[in-house]
Image: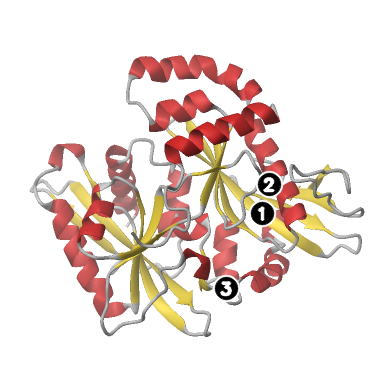
Amino acid sequence: MQQYGSDLHSLLSDAFEGWGSEAYFTWKYSAYPDYDPQADNFTVRNDSGRLVAARRVFRHRIHTPAGESLSVHIHGGTAVAEADRGRGHYTELLESSRAYSEREADCLVTFNRAGKITTKHHKKNGWNWFRLPIYASVISPSRVFSKYMTESDVLSNAACRLSSVDRKLTRNSLVSRSLAAAAETLYGNPDKNGTNDSSSGSGREIQPPGSSVQSNGDRVASGVSITQHTGESAGSMASELHDRLQNQLTGHYHFDRSIERLKHCLSYPSSTVFVARDSHGAIIDFVVAGILNKDGFVECRVLEQTWTQPAVTRALFEAVEAHARSQRADVVVASTATQPAAHWIPLGTEYMMWPPSADGPQLSADPDDWRVTLYDAL
């Protein structure tokens, strides 16, 4: 199994350039809750036994607003080695994994990006879908441009040289908001409704109580403290964070947030938890963020967050952005129904999709009925 893991990580890195580190692979694949290595992996090997294509099923549960609990299989992307494409492996894995999930689970869902072959395939075949509320705070516009808008080595190298300059520019709120307005024109959701058509591990205070004034004029109440936690310090808070999270789930379709799931979320490589407490020490809101280095392009991903008091959560997002800059991240990304700040760009390019079903559970295709974070979409 260890050799299979090594082969699969190599395949993912080949098929999806800069997919992620070995630590990220272990977290997402081997350590994923309820993983059954004998049943959840769909693979193709060539005549010499080399792994050339793979697709993974991730077991999860969806809870409905009515309190129903449904088993769900989240299908990951299909990785096919570049030298072995065009031989039917993609279709073979797509069909075999779907047949398995239709037998074993109540629901099957995928997370897809606009313009990709799987997204086009699903839309063509009548799948249900809605756009995820993905927002991005761009720290290095030149690096983001070179990653998502061009494959030119010349422009990518130029972007690396410009990165230190544009990082300084995006610290200015006027520049950041202007960038957001321009970027929304390029990437923003044309359908605004989104409907169908390494540290010590100890906590530390990072912001004096009551010091944050938000871009919309909201002020964090006096007596609120914001602290940053990693490692064992973050893990020891799992039960407390889990309790705080529960009131965010009521009334929405949402993926399971058992204590085991939250602990897995907190174990994300290089994750940091930002916590806001009141003057009595009770948690008001929190944000979990993790760094992913994709072959030199660094994303800070907000995996989970609560919005009990929006002004407090916006202050937490400010702390996440400061942390991301300190880690030389190029962009911060979150899935949240509430825009973290005016300079965060709504991308409108990410989808949750599932096949039509005449006799199975009927899930809502209205994004307002759902609560989905990046932890679910990973």
CA gap, disc 1 to disc 2? Answer: 7 Å
Residue 207 image position (x, y, % from top left): 83, 43
Q: Tell me the quadrant of the picture where the C terminus can be found.
A: bottom left
Disc 1 or 2, which lies upstream in sequence? 1
Q: Residue 28: name its quadrant.
A: bottom left
Q: Residue at x 53, y 80 (%)?
A: 65
Q: Residue, x 31% and y 53% (percent of image)?
A: 77
Mark 1 Cα within 10 Å, few/some/many (few <14, many 20+)?
many
Residue at horizontal 40 percent and vertical 75 percent from the top: 363
Measure how far apart labels 1 and 3 are at the Cα level.
Answer: 17 Å
Q: Position of residue 37 (x, y in %)?
A: 33, 65
Mark 3 neighbour density, 10 Å: few (under 14) some (14–19) many (20 or more): few
Residue type (three-letter) at the residue carrying disc 2 = Phe
Q: Which residue is mark 3?
A: 258
The tag earlier along the polypeptide, 2 or 3, is 3
Secondary structure at numbered mark 1: strand
- The correct choice, above or below, for 293 with respect to 34 in the image is above
Q: Tell how many labels.
A: 3
Residue 103 in view (yes/no):
yes
Look at discs 1 and 3 and give the one toward the viewer: 1
Left or right of 239, for residue 271: left
Q: Quadrant of the N terminus?
A: bottom left
Q: Which residue is mark 2?
A: 317
- Residue 97 at what x, y percent from top left? 23, 66
Say which element carries label 2: helix
What x and y, as percent, mark residue 285? Answer: 73, 60
Label 3 sits on a secondary structure element that is loop
* Mark 1 lies on residue: 287
